Amino acid sequence: MQKQRITVGYVELTDEESERLFEKVRKDKGIEGYAELQGLMDDFDSQVIEPQEEPLKDMLGDEAPPEESDKGMRYIEVFNKLEEDSRYRIKASKQH
């Protein structure tokens, strides 16, 4: 099976992101290859979900609760733009 970069909406996913998305969609939709995934993604769009900024440490100082480990993660959410369908959220490769 030939791996390829997947484009969703105007976003071209990295190799790692494409692989993460393929694994999620493969289980959900029963697809067998990246060509099928790209065909399916032609009806999908994506958005980047930025990490929430919570300046509790600045406001509360040492009394601030520890932050959860995934709060600083950036995600890409993939959704069908034409009809109600599955949504997929994958961790973005570039976190800076």
Image (cartoon, rainbow, N blue to C red):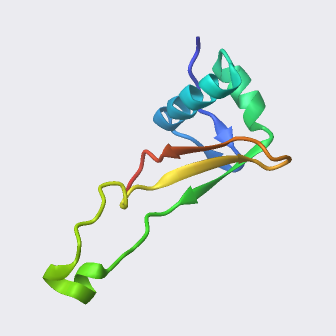
Count numbered badges in the picture: 0
The residue most toward the top is: 1
Where is residue 54, by image quadrant? bottom left
Left or right of residue 2: residue 74: left
- On screen, 48 above or below 86? below
Where is residue 74, by image quadrant? bottom left
Quarter of the picture containing the N terminus is top right
- On screen, 30 above or below 21? above
Residue at 52% x, 29% y: name it: 19
Left or right of residue 77: residue 92: left
Residue at 22% x, 78% y: name it: 64
82 or 64, which lies in front? Answer: 64
Residue at 14% x, 80% y: name it: 62
Q: Position of residue 66 (x, y in %)?
A: 22, 67
Q: Position of residue 22 (x, y in %)?
A: 58, 28
The residue most toward the left is: 62
Q: Position of residue 23 (x, y in %)?
A: 54, 26
14 or 23, which lies in front? Answer: 23
Q: Position of residue 33 (x, y in %)?
A: 65, 17
- On screen, 91 above or below 28? below
Quarter of the picture containing the C terminus is bottom left
The residue most toward the bottom is: 59
Residue at 60% x, 50% y: name it: 77
